[in-house]
Amino acid sequence: MLVFFRVRFNFTRDVIRVTGRYWCVQCAALQRELEDLRRAKEERERELEAENNEFKMEIVKLRAEMEAILRELQSIMDSKLGLELEIAAYRKLLEGEETRLASRACTDFPVILS
């Protein structure tokens, strides 16, 4: 009976030892996978940070371009307004001249009374 317990003890010890080795191997594999995932995450974060910085620089560039376009548009609008005012002034002068000529034409013709 003592032999039976000794064999059973040795068997149980061997099972525990094999199971322990299995879990150590599994644990080591999971730790390697975890480290790989951490490295991949850090690399992806660096890539995203670089991409984010590129986008920020693009935004600054586009804002500067937009401000230049708005300044040019304002200049064009100011010129347009000035030209519209000048056209209105010339139109008023032309209408005044037409009125003067029309009234003069009426007085230039002699009136014949019969």
Image (tube, rainbow, N blue to C red):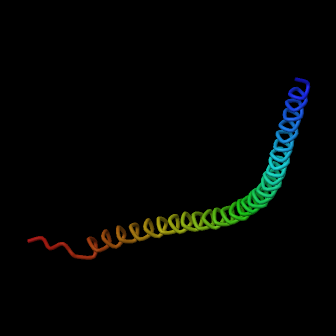
- Quadrant location of the N terminus in the rendered image: top right
Q: For this view, does 40 lie left or right of residue 107? A: right
Can you say whether 48 is above or below 96 in the image?
above
Q: For this view, does 48 lie left or right of residue 87? A: right
Can you say whether 110 is above or below 29 in the image?
below
Q: For the point 82% across and 39% down, which residue is it?
A: 19
Task: Residue 112: give x, y in percent of width and height.
Answer: 14, 73
Residue lying farthest to the top in this orientation: 1
Query: Based on the displayed image, in which of its 4 quarters is residue 51 positioned?
Result: bottom right
Closest to the observer, 67 or 71: 67
Closest to the observer, 57 or 82: 57
Can you say whether 80 is above or below 6 in the image?
below
Task: Residue 60: give x, y in percent of width and height.
Answer: 74, 60
- Quadrant location of the C terminus in the rendered image: bottom left
- Number of marks in the rendered image: 0
Residue lying farthest to the left in this orientation: 114
Closest to the observer, 84 or 100: 84
Q: For this view, does 104 lie left or right of residue 84? A: left
Query: Based on the displayed image, in which of its 4 quarters is residue 108 positioned?
Result: bottom left
Q: For this view, does 24 lie left or right of residue 108? A: right
Closest to the observer, 64 or 89: 64
Q: For the point 89% across and 34% down, which residue is it?
A: 10
Task: Residue 93: give x, y in percent of width and height.
Answer: 45, 69
Task: Residue 28: give x, y in percent of width and height.
Answer: 85, 48
Query: Based on the displayed image, in which of its 4 quarters is residue 62 positioned?
Result: bottom right
Residue lying farthest to the bottom in this orientation: 109
